[in-house]
Amino acid sequence: MVHGIVAGMSYPLRGLGLLRRSPRLWTFLILPIFVNIIVGALIYVGLLLPAWSGLDGAALWLDQWASGWIAQLPAWMGLLENLILGVAWLVKILLTLALFLLTGFLLLQFGTLIGSPWYGQLSEAVERSRLGYATVIDVGIVRDLGRAILFELKKLLLWGAIALILLLLSFVPGIGPLVISLGWFSLTALITGLDFLDGPSERRRYRFRRKLALIFQALPASASFSVVCCLLITIPFLNLLTIPLCVVAGTMFWCDRLAPRLEPTPPSTEPLPLNE
């Protein structure tokens, strides 16, 4: 179990190593990064900056709230001052992380949707280098577009169903805030994992349920991989580069940990070099 967790966490680093050794792959990165810059600029200007301004207002309110509580305390309860200030700072940090997570998640959804043709080529090139072949079932551009839209809708339905459960659990006294915080992050990580592991599965035209089942079959490695990728897309500006990196890492993960149990490698094929 520990080995699986560590292995899953290592794939972004493995992906970085593959990119360093494979100059040909960089030709597939230029346009996705350009798309990410455009989408990221719209999200940062339209969401991050206004939300950051609102966060400053919330932080000021928290400071005033903490000061008000402290002023009402009797002298013998002065020890609670540090506790109240600590809670206020913790709330500030959590709100900041939630904002970064939201903007990174939106960048992932819109960036990968708009840049899907180039991400598909990148993933296919990595699969060929890893397995020596790439399975592609052609269904035509119209059906391919329909599958992409349906995939997004099913992710939205999955998100909504789990979000409703989390919302109900948030009213449980005592554990509600902790459950909803961990639950929201886990849900975001699950959707992130679905996105980054989708390339090889989509080329084989797997159903949504099977794509979801593959993540659970690859536990705990798939969980640690998804969490690390979720953290990487949370870092502002750096996520413009880490999203393509995680596409590479996700394809490597699929080839190493899922392909052997799904389809035997044809004996006549060998991994193709990319360091040209």
Image (cartoon, rainbow, N blue to C red):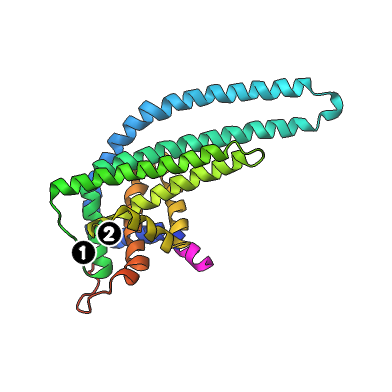
| Extreme residue in the right direction | 76
Task: Give whichever of discs 2 and 1 has the lower sequence position.
Answer: 1
Q: Are marks 2 and 1 in contact (CB under 8 Å)?
A: yes
Residue 22: x %, y % from top left: 26, 61
Q: Residues within 10 Å of mark 1 (few under 14, many from 20)?
A: some
Task: Tell me which amino acid carries mark 2.
Answer: Pro
Residue, x 69% and y 31% (percent of image)?
85
Residue 275: x %, y % from top left: 24, 65
Q: In the picture, residue 92 is in which quadrant? A: top right
Check disc 2 and report its element: helix, strand or loop: helix
Q: In the picture, residue 101 is in which quadrant? A: top left
Residue, x 63% and y 33% (percent of image)?
89
Q: Residue 200: which numbered mark, if any?
A: 2
Residue 246: x %, y % from top left: 36, 53
Residue interval drawn in magenta: 1-7
Residue corresponding to mark 1: 135
Residue, x 33% and y 35% (percent of image)?
40
Q: How many badges with numbers are in the image?
A: 2
Task: Tell me which amino acid carries mark 1.
Answer: Thr
230 to the left or right of 244: right
Q: Main secondary structure of the magenta part?
A: helix
